């Protein structure tokens, strides 16, 4: 044994050291001599030599196959694998798949990984032997365990294939089970299956759908009830298209007929149900005004419940009948409703009225058109400002539309919250930290953010309005108004050429007086310049400076306020109402 190994090593070393000419001449003879003596390595080297196309000599697969067979008979696993490859392809030998698979199996039994994969394919496909999925899987597992990537991929695909097969061979309980069973084509793993596996799955899928889908679809159609059921039937063809499209055309036509039949049945039931409900809730109501309100509310509920179904042609007659009844009510109540609209003063009152008595702006009965005109005129009356830069805000305040005013306030302050919120919060936390070092407990961090969130354009509006008041509404000033004094101290600092401080000269104090009617004195203290040392006032003055812009800017508020004061007399009803509304909003906007 030792002598045989030693001889083989000498053969390899000599073969590696020889030139190509020597390999073509002396080394080949030497290898043949060693191979004929039964040296397996020489036999393999000779086979390799005959399978290479070197020095212009063509490959000789028949001689290669001969020497591989000699080594294979001596039990060499590599020789067995390579001989099996030639037998499978028919190179140099007569093609013999059966012998090939036998040699693959012999090499595989010696843990030759490549051979393990090939023998697994033989058992799986039935090449040269009977199909045996169990044996094939065993060999795939051995090859995968030995590190063969192709075998690993096969096992993953095989697991996926079996996962797909399981639901296709199980009776579904509901349509969702069928959809889930058909979803395998969406998986990336499906593309990696063999053509044979794909074809088998397609066949099984078709049989599965033909057998189970029609009964479940018919059952689903039969159980539909009410508006929800009608809505389901409208979307039935598109929602279940994946399943329906795979049915035979006769089956598809049958389903379409069943859907239409069920829709017609439900239409009649829905129409009758809503006709009876309208009669009970509206027509039988003795008070006309209550009947109109009930009719409008009924229509709102119906449109909400029907949603997209509400405008379907199938329900035209039902809608027309109700519209005709409302038309009669509008005609009878025209004077009463018109008078009620004219007596309204605030936005929320107008909103409540339209919510109660006005249904659809597109309904063109003469009675409703008359009410619509009255509502439009009243809206223009309680929201009279259309030519101001901040007309939306002024109209919201004037009409008492606090929701709209709050929305505009939020849109104004949002950029500050977004861009400065974190910085201010950090500053507040730092102040709280210093306070804690001094033994005091503060919460500036939370207070600053809360003040910022609670800021409103009503503050700069009032500040601008009150500062301009003595000049633009002079005739409406109190005989002895409240005086607010503001003193501004300044100095000039002198420095040398290097920027170092030399000396400073203080200037005389600049004193300004602001006159405010007693009614607004407390408001001016909060929003104006009455108390310059007040921290909150300074914060507001900073935030509401003219340099900051948003959807409605401080500049818009300023120009709108001055245009408003130029347009109206200070004692006019519009100015008095605007002042009352501004005052109400200022004191209550945080609660609203």
Image (cartoon, rainbow, N blue to C red):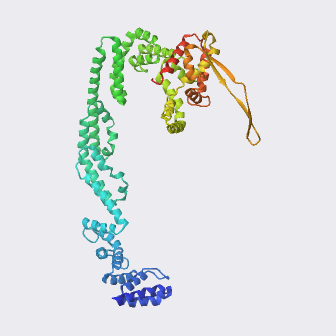
Q: Is residue 511 left or right of residue 118?
A: right
Q: Residue at x 36, y 59 (%)?
A: 192
Splitting the image into 4 quarters, where does residue 571 fall? top right
Whole-percent x and y of residue 396? 50, 21
Residue 438 appears left or right of 472: left
Residue 265, position in %: x, y? 26, 30
Task: Give percent across and percent down for residue 349.
Answer: 43, 16
Give the quadrant of the N terminus.
bottom left
Q: Which residue reaches farthest front?
A: 439
How many numbered circles are shown? 0
Is 522 above or below relative to 547? above
Q: Is residue 463 above or below residue 573?
A: below
As rendered, which of 492 and 133 lies closer to the eye? 492
Q: Is residue 390 visible?
A: no
Residue 170 to residue 305: above or below: below
Residue pictured at 30% horizontal, 32% vertical = 228
Pick the quarter of the image with the C terminus. top left
Q: Nearer the viewer, residue 2 or 429?
A: 429
Percent position of residue 199, x then y = 31, 57
Q: Is 582 on the left or on the right of 302, as rendered?
A: right
83 horizontally vs 361: left or right? left
In this orientation, does residue 9 appear?
Answer: yes
Q: Residue at x 54, y 20 (%)?
A: 394
Examine the image and state in which quarter residue 477 appears. Answer: top right
Between 86 and 511, the residue placed more toward the observer is 511
């Amino acid at each position: 044994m030792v002598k045989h190994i030693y001889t083989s090593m000498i053969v390899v070393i000599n073969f590696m050291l020889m030139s190509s000419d020597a390999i073509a001449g002396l080394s080949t003879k030497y290898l043949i001599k060693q191979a004929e003596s039964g040296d397996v390595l020489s036999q393999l080297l000779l086979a390799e030599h005959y399978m290479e196309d070197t020095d212009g000599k063509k490959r000789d697969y028949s001689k290669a196959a001969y020497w591989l067979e000699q080594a294979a008979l001596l039990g060499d696993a590599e020789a067995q694998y390579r001989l099996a490859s030639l037998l499978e392809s028919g190179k140099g030998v007569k093609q013999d798949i059966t012998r090939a698979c036998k040699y693959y199996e012999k090499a595989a039994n010696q843990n030759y990984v490549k051979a393990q994969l090939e023998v697994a394919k033989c058992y799986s496909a039935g090449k040269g032997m009977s199909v045996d999925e169990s044996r094939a899987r065993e060999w795939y597992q051995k090859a995968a365990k030995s590190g063969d990537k192709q075998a690993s991929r096969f096992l993953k695909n095989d697991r996926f294939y079996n996962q797909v097969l399981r639901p296709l061979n199980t009776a579904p309980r509901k349509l969702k089970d069928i959809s889930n069973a058909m979803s395998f084509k969406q998986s990336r793993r499906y593309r990696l299956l063999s053509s044979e596996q794909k074809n088998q799955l397609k066949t099984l899928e078709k049989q599965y759908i033909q057998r189970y889908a029609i009964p479940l679809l018919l059952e689903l159609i039969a159980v539909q009830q009410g508006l929800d059921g009608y809505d389901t039937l409208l979307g039935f063809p598109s929602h279940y298209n994946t399943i329906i499209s795979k049915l035979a055309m006769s089956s598809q036509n049958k389903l379409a007929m069943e859907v239409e039949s069920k829709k017609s049945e439900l239409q009649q039931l829905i129409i009758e149900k809503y006709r009876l409900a309208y009669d009970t809730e509206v027509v039988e109501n003795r008070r006309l005004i209550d009947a109109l309100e009930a009719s409008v509310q009924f229509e709102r509920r119906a449109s909400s419940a029907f949603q997209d179904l509400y405008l379907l042609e199938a329900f035209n007659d039902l809608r027309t009948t109700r519209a005709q009844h409302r038309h009669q009510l509008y005609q009878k109540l025209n004077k009463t409703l018109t008078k009620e609209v004219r007596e309204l003063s605030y936005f929320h009152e107008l909103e409540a009225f339209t919510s109660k008595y006005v249904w659809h702006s597109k309904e063109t009965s003469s009675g409703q058109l008359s009410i619509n005109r009255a509502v439009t005129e009243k809206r223009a009356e309680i929201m009279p400002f259309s030519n101001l830069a901040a007309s939306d805000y002024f109209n919201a305040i004037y009409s008492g539309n606090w929701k709209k005013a709050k929305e505009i306030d939020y849109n104004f302050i949002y950029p500050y919250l977004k861009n400065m919120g974190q910085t201010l919060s950090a500053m507040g936390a730092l102040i709280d930290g210093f306070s804690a070092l001094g033994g005091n407990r503060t919460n500036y961090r939370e207070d600053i953010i809360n003040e910022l969130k609670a800021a409103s354009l009503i503050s700069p509006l009032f500040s601008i309005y009150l500062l301009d008041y003595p000049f633009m509404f002079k005739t409406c000033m109190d005989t002895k108004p409240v005086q607010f004094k503001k003193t501004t101290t300044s100095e000039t600092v002198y420095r040398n050429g290097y920027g170092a401080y030399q000396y400073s000269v203080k200037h005389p104090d600049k004193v300004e007086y602001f006159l405010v009617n007693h009614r607004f004195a407390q408001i001016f203290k909060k929003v104006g310049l009455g108390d310059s040392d007040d921290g909150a006032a300074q914060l507001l003055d900073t935030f509401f400076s003219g340099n900051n812009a948003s959807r409605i800017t401080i500049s818009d508020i300023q120009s709108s306020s001055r245009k408003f004061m130029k347009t109206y007399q200070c004692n006019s009803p519009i100015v008095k109402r605007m002042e009352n509304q501004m005052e109400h909003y200022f004191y209550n906007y945080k609660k609203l």
